[in-house]
Structure formats: structure tokens, C-alpha cells
Image (cartoon, rainbow, N blue to C red):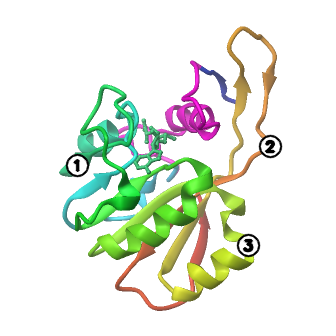
Amino acid sequence: MKFRVRLRGTFTGNPGWSLVKAILAPFNLMHPQGCSNHHCLKDREKFIGNIWECACGTGKMSEIIKKNGYEVISSDLVDRGYGESNIDFLKSEKKVDNIITNPPFKLGQDFVLHGLKLVKNKLAIFNKLNFLEGIRRKEKIFNQNKLKNVYVFSRRVSFVKEGQTKSAGGLIAFAWFVFDVNYNGKPTIDWI
Ligand SMILES: C[S@@+](CC[C@H](N)C(=O)[O-])C[C@H]1O[C@@H](n2cnc3c(N)ncnc32)[C@H](O)[C@@H]1O
């Protein structure tokens, strides 16, 4: 089944936003209903304690996590009308139980490195699958042996750009990267 999603504008300087916004809805990543085929992170991972959505944007993901019964703290660097604004996650020292977020793709490495210092349990980051590549990421992140699970999206999404009728995209593979600070080993890979 192909999904056609109309994009509704982007955040300046954050090209990843449109894709993420589009992909979240069709796959109901953490939606309480509609997760029958294990297309949700929530069916795979349990989070003990509170969850910080530290790049919450307009709160789409925060709201879904909340509906799943979790206590959610929401913040963003920019005031997007949701959660606490002007909070630079990369400078924050707030300790939390877990983090689930989708930062701008280019900041993925910084968010993981900083997040691992702040969580007591898990850090789940939504990013492109090729986040697994890279010498620096291998040295700085993956050699820490804290990456526990990678959930690859088995379906691709077609995108319809604002003002256009033809769908495009579907070429980028995405995954959830779940780190656990209490883990010390190699990651498993699965498909959602
Ligand atoms: C892809 S959007 C996240 C969307 C959000 N998860 C949702 O479901 O609506 C990325 C967000 O990261 C925020 N951001 C960028 N740099 C940041 C930083 N250093 N600290 C906190 N938030 C940041 C942007 O303002 C943007 O809202």
C-alpha cells in the first residue's frame, strides 16, 4: 500500500521536518490504535519513567506519546506554540528517565551524544537509516555499545509537495535508533 502525504510547509533551516511530519502520520509511530502490524515503536519498546521530547516542534509526537500513558516533558529551541520554548537541548543539563525525539537530521550525532549523558534509561532517536554510517559516529557513538535496537521502516512513503500533484520521494530509508545507557553490547536490528 502506498501512502500519499501532502506536505504543509517546513521549518526554516530544517529540511528534515517535512519528511518527518509526513511519515509520522501514516505509520502511526506511537499511536494507541492502528498498530496491528507492529508498525509502532510503542509495540516494541517499553519506557520506564518519564519521557522528554526535547525537540517537540508543534507537539505531534509528544501528544501521541502522552496518549500512550506516558508522562511527557516537551521543549524546543524555537517557540512553535507547544511545550517550553527557548530550551537548547544541547546545552541542557536536565536529567530524565528517557528521551524520544526526532531532531534535525544534521544534529543527530550531537543529540545522541548529549542525550546519553542525560538519560537514566533509554534514548530513542528517529533518523535516516544512514545514520549508521560514518567513521566519527562509529568512534563517538556506536563504539560506546549503548545502541540496543534499530527498527528499520520496511515501507517507504511517497510525498506530494505543496502546490504540486505529483508524488515524489520515497527514496529515503528511516529508522528508530534506541539507545539504552544500561546496555553494553551490540545492537539488534528489526523491521517495523
Ligand atoms: C523535526 S522537528 C521535530 C518535530 C516534533 N518532534 C513533532 O513531532 O512535532 C525538529 C525540531 O528540533 C528543534 N531544534 C533544533 N535544534 C534544537 C536544539 N538545539 N534544541 C532543541 N530543539 C532544537 C527545531 O526547532 C524543530 O522544532
Residue 31, label in figure: none
- Label 1 sits on residue: 72
Say few, some or many: other residues with alpha carbon within 10 Å of mark 1 (under 14 / 14 to 19 / 20 or more). many
Q: Is residue 109 left or right of residue 131?
A: left
- CA gap, disc 1 and disc 2: 32 Å
Residue identified by numbered label 2: 171
Q: Which residue is mark 3?
A: 134
Q: Quadrant of residue 170?
A: top right
Viewer-side label of 1, 3: 3
Q: Are dots 3 and 2 in contact, CB under 8 Å?
A: no
Q: Are marks 1 and 3 in contact (CB under 8 Å)?
A: no
Which numbered disc, 1 or 2, marks the residue that appears first in the sequence? 1
* Residue toward you, 103 or 188: 103
Q: Is residue 86 left or right of residue 185?
A: left
| Position of residue 17 in the picture relative to residue 113 (left or right) | right
Quarter of the rendered image showing ligand 1: top left
Q: Is residue 148 left or right of residue 12?
A: left
Amino acid type at circle 2 is Leu
- Give residue 143's position: percent from left, percent from top: 58, 87
Please tell me which residue is depicted at 42% across the width and 69% down the height of the picture: 114
Identified at 39% across, 74% down, the residue is 116
- How far across and down, in percent of the image, does residue 91 sit? 35, 60
Q: Dividing the picture into quarters, in which one does residue 162 lie?
A: top right
Q: Magenta segment, which residues? A: 8-37
Question: How many badges with numbers are in the image?
Answer: 3
Dominant secondary structure, magenta: loop
Quarter holding the N terminus? top right
* Among numbered discs 1 and 3, the one appearing first in the sequence: 1
